[in-house]
Image (cartoon, rainbow, N blue to C red):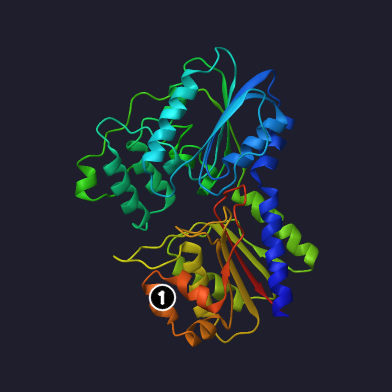
Amino acid sequence: MEATARRQLRAVFDHALAAVHGETAVYRHLRSRPLAGPVDVLAVGKAAGAMFDGAVAGCDARRGLVVTKPGHGRPRRSPAEAVEVLESAHPVPDRRSLAAGEALLAFIGGLPRGRPLLILVSGGASSLVEVPAAGVDLDLLVRANRWLLGSGLDIGAVNAVRRRLSRIKGGGLPGLLGDRPARGLLISDVPGDDPSVIGSGLLAPGAGALPGVPDWLAARLPGPSAVRGGGIDLAVVASNARARSAAAERARETGWPVHARGALVEGDARQAARALVAEAAGGPPGLYLRGGETTVTLPAAPGEGGRNQHFALAAADAIRGRDDLLVLAAGTDGSDGPTAWAGGLVDGGTVERGEAAGLDARQALAAADSGRFLDASGDRFATGPTGTNVMDLYLVFKSA
C-alpha cells in the first residue's frame, strides 16, 4: 500500500501545483480581462519567470524586467522588444537586491508615456528587490531580515516591519508611476490574500500595528512614508485556496474521501503537525487536506531544514510505528527555508530509519535540524522550481 499511496499523494500535490502555475494563472486572467495594445511588463518574485511567460502569451508585451530567485526559472518567452532578467537574493537581501531596485527604478523611468504597465508579483519579492528608505543601509536590511526570519512571527507581522524599511514596499511602487496606467496581478503566498502583505505590499499600502522588535531595530526603524500611490487595478490570480481545491479534485478522482477545512494552518510548526495528525488518527480514512504557513522559532545555531521539514519530522514523531498514515508537508514554491527541498513525505517508519542512522528525532527538532534527519531517513521531498508560490500544503492520508 505504502509505495502506491506515496505516488498517489505526490500526484495530488502535483495536480494542485498545476492549477496555480504562474503562466497558467496570468494567461487565464488576461484571456478573461484583455489588455489592449502594447504593454510593458515588470515581474518580481519566485514565480516571476512563469508569470512573465503568461503575460507574453496573453498580451502584446513589448519590454520586460524580470527579477527572480536563482534557479527558480527564467522566462521562456520573449516580448516584442527586449527583456532583462535579474537573479537576486532570497530570503535575506544583499547587494543584488539593491541592484534590482535600481534596475526597477530605471525601467519605470524609461517607460513610454501612455503605454500600460503590467506588474506581476509573487512571493519572494520582499527580499529580491529593494530600494531602502532614508536612513536604511544594507547592513540594517540584512540584520533586520535575519532577525525576522528566526523570530517566529507570522508573515503579516514580518512584512509590516519590511514595509517600514523600504521606499517601494507598502504601496510605494505605484507612487512612482505617476499617471501611467497599470494593472497588478498577484500570486498570493499570504493568509487572506491581502495585497498589502504580498511582497511586503509592493503594490498596496498596509495598515496595522508593528510587532514588538528589538531595541536596536526600533531605534533605526523609519516611520511610515507619506508618499504612497493608489488607483492601481489589482487582482489575485492564484492562491492556496485554489491549490487546495485542485488537490481535493484529484484525491476524489483517486477514490479517496476528502476531509478539508477552510481555516489555514498557522502558528508553531511542531504543534500544528501534532494537531493535524491527531485529527487524522482519530477520524475516518481518506485525505486530510490543509493549507497555510507555520512558523519555527530558531535556536541560536540552527541546523539544516525549513518549516515544512520541521512539520514533517514532528508528524513522523507523532505517527511512529503506525502503518496507516502518510504525511506530506511541502512548500508550493519548491523550496523550504534556505534549502533546495520542498519539505518532507513521512510515514510510521521515518523515525526508526533516521535513528538507525545514528540521529535522534526530538533532538533534531529542538536544534531545527529536521532536514538532516529526513535526509538520513530518505523522506525529504523535492519538486524543483514550481513556477508558483501559494504558501504550503499539508496532506495526511489515512488508509482503510
Where residue 23 sits: x, y (%)? 67, 41
Instruction: Identify the image quadrant of residue 36.
Output: top right
The residue type indicated by label 1 comes to: Ala
Where residue 340 sits: x, y (%)? 52, 59
Name the one closer to the observer, 360 or 260. 360
Q: Residues within 10 Å of mark 1 (few under 14, many from 20)?
A: many
Residue farthest toward the top in the current orientation of the protein: 113
Which residue lies at the image location 49% right of the left edge and 32% below the top edge? 203
Q: In the shown orientation, is residue 388 left or right of residue 255? A: left
Which residue lies at the image location 48% right of the left edge and 85% below the top edge? 355
Quadrant assignment for the C terminus: bottom right
Where residue 104 sits: x, y (%)? 46, 28
Instruction: List the residue tagged with mark 1.
Output: 364
Quadrant assignment for the N terminus: bottom right
Instruction: Identify the image quadrant of residue 326.
Output: bottom right
Which residue lies at the image location 52% right of the left edge and 73% below the top edge? 375
Q: Secondary structure at mark 1?
A: helix
Which residue lies at the image location 59% right of the left edge and 55% below the top edge? 332
Total label count?
1
Where residue 71 sits: x, y (%)? 55, 49
Instruction: Identify the image quadrant of residue 105.
Output: top left
Q: Is residue 177 visible?
A: no
Q: Is residue 132 visible?
A: yes
Q: Is residue 55 above or below residue 231?
A: below
Name the one closer to the observer, 237 or 146. 146
Q: In the shown orientation, is residue 208 left or right of residue 7? A: left
